[in-house]
């Protein structure tokens, strides 16, 4: 028996043309991936963002209050570095692009139109060395990363940014362009892994990321390449501090392995706060019903000294955290109800989980050995804090 099979003719040219159909950005990236790891990196599978608090939600120190402090952390994990004649204010605000709630805002309140060689004004985020082990920077296996962020400024033109190591002798400066004034724009830059130099892999500074408002020639270099120098910014860039009232906002900062900028990794607020508390933890006296929240338990062992025993919610980066306090605080006797006023700190021994602090008090004849609570004296702004910042 003979079986005949008939088939419609195929237009080979038409079938080949279908191969050029658009498959979307992600589809193109997946098809172009040479390895399974590249495919995963291109779509951002799993935990990916090396930056902490990239969406600017956590602000333990100042909340939304504007500050003029230089060399200080404004929003958690973001420090202002300033050596100029300019003056600026910095704060957490709720002006943000779609998908975000907060941003960091900088406003120029006093200008510096002449930038000297050693001048600089920038905001820096530092990625701990423990979090960059997998990048293999400083070797022939160094991995490519992509930095992306949302930015808005009243000043258009080429602004500056850079990545550098802890030794400050390897840096990758680059420009990003603000095309439209006062408009949120998304930027990204792909950075080849640095094949040489020393990159910390422990609790020290791994990768510094700096966003420049102005910087002098001492700290600038050729853009879009690894330089054997500490270049905080590219050779040519906008001087934001030259214009009084100029503004600059940033949020959605993400540093990830791979050649593509993927969608921002949104983590829960609780998780982001805990990541920040590894470096800075603040206990506030505001308990919702006046400033009387208990901040620490203590015991009196002398008429002029009392020993506090803090326990950290999150282990610190290293032992030896710096202790600070503010507002109207008191030591309240748990048995008698008597109060003792604190006048200073004599010494402390703090591990990564807690320890003790010897506090100086006015001469007091209450019984030694009594238990006390360190609390606010009705001051909602009273606090104690522990810093293990990079």
Image (spheres, rainbow, N blue to C red):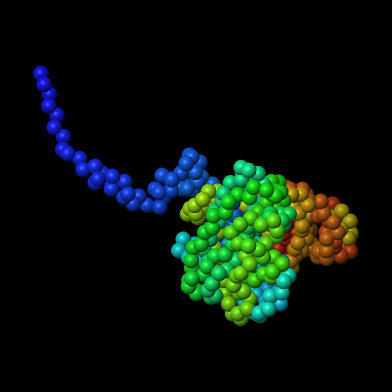
Identified at 52% across, 59% down, the residue is 188
Of 154 and 386, which appears nearest the observer? Answer: 154
Residue 364 falls left or right of residue 13: right
**Image-quadrant location for residue 368:** bottom right
Where does the image place residue 185, in percent across and percent down from the top left? 48, 66
Identified at 57% across, 74% down, the residue is 247
Residue 388 shows in this picture: no
Of 367 and 86, which appears nearest the observer? Answer: 86
Where does the image place residue 269, in percent across and percent down from the top left? 55, 55
Compared with residue 386, is residue 351 higher up or lower down, i.e. above or below?
above
Residue 331 falls left or right of residue 29: right
Where does the image place residue 271, in percent across and percent down from the top left? 57, 51
Compared with residue 123, is residue 298 higher up or lower down, i.e. above or below?
above
Quadrant showing the N terminus: top left
Residue 5 falls left or right of residue 276: left
Quadrant showing the C terminus: bottom right
Identified at 46% across, 61% down, the residue is 99
Residue farthest toward the front in the current orientation of the protein: 13
Identified at 51% across, 53% down, the residue is 265
Where does the image place residue 102, in percent across and percent down from the top left? 54, 65
């Amino acid at each position: 028996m003979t079986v005949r099979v008939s088939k419609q003719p195929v237009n080979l040219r038409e079938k080949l043309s279908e191969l050029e159909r658009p498959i979307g950005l992600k589809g193109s990236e997946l098809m172009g991936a040479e390895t399974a790891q590249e495919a995963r990196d291109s779509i951002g599978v799993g935990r990916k963002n090396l930056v902490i608090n990239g969406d600017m939600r956590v602000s333990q120190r100042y909340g939304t209050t504007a500050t003029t402090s230089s060399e200080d952390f404004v929003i958690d994990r973001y420090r202002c570095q300033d050596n100029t004649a300019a003056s600026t204010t910095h704060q957490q605000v709720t002006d943000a692009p779609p998908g975000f709630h907060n941003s960091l805002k900088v406003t120029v309140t006093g200008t510096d139109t002449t930038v000297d060689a050693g001048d600089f004004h920038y905001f820096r985020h530092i990625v701990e060395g423990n979090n960059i082990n997998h990048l293999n920077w400083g070797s022939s296996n160094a991995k490519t990363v992509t930095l992306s962020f949302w930015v808005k400024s009243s000043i258009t033109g080429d602004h500056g940014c850079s990545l550098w190591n802890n030794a400050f002798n390897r840096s990758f400066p680059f420009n990003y362009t603000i095309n439209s004034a006062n408009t949120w724009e998304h930027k990204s830059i792909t950075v080849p892994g640095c094949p040489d130099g020393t990159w910390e892999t422990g609790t020290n500074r791994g990768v510094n990321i700096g966003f420049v408002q102005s910087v002098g020639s001492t700290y600038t270099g050729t853009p879009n390449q690894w330089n054997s120098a500490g270049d905080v910014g590219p050779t040519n860039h906008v001087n934001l501090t030259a214009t009084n009232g100029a503004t600059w906002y940033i949020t959605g900062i993400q540093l990830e392995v791979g050649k593509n900028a993927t969608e921002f990794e949104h983590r829960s607020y609780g998780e982001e706060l805990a990541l920040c508390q590894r470096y800075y933890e603040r206990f506030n006296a505001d308990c919702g019903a006046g400033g009387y929240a208990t901040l620490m338990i203590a015991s009196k062992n002398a008429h002029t000294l009392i020993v506090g025993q803090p326990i950290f919610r999150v282990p610190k980066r290293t032992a030896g955290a710096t202790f600070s306090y503010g507002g109207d605080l008191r030591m309240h006797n748990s048995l008698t109800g008597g109060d003792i006023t604190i006048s200073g700190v004599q010494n402390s021994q703090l591990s990564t989980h807690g320890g003790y602090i010897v506090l100086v008090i006015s001469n007091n004849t209450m019984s030694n050995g009594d238990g006390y609570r360190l609390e606010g004296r009705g001051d909602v702004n009273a606090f104690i804090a522990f810093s293990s910042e990079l």
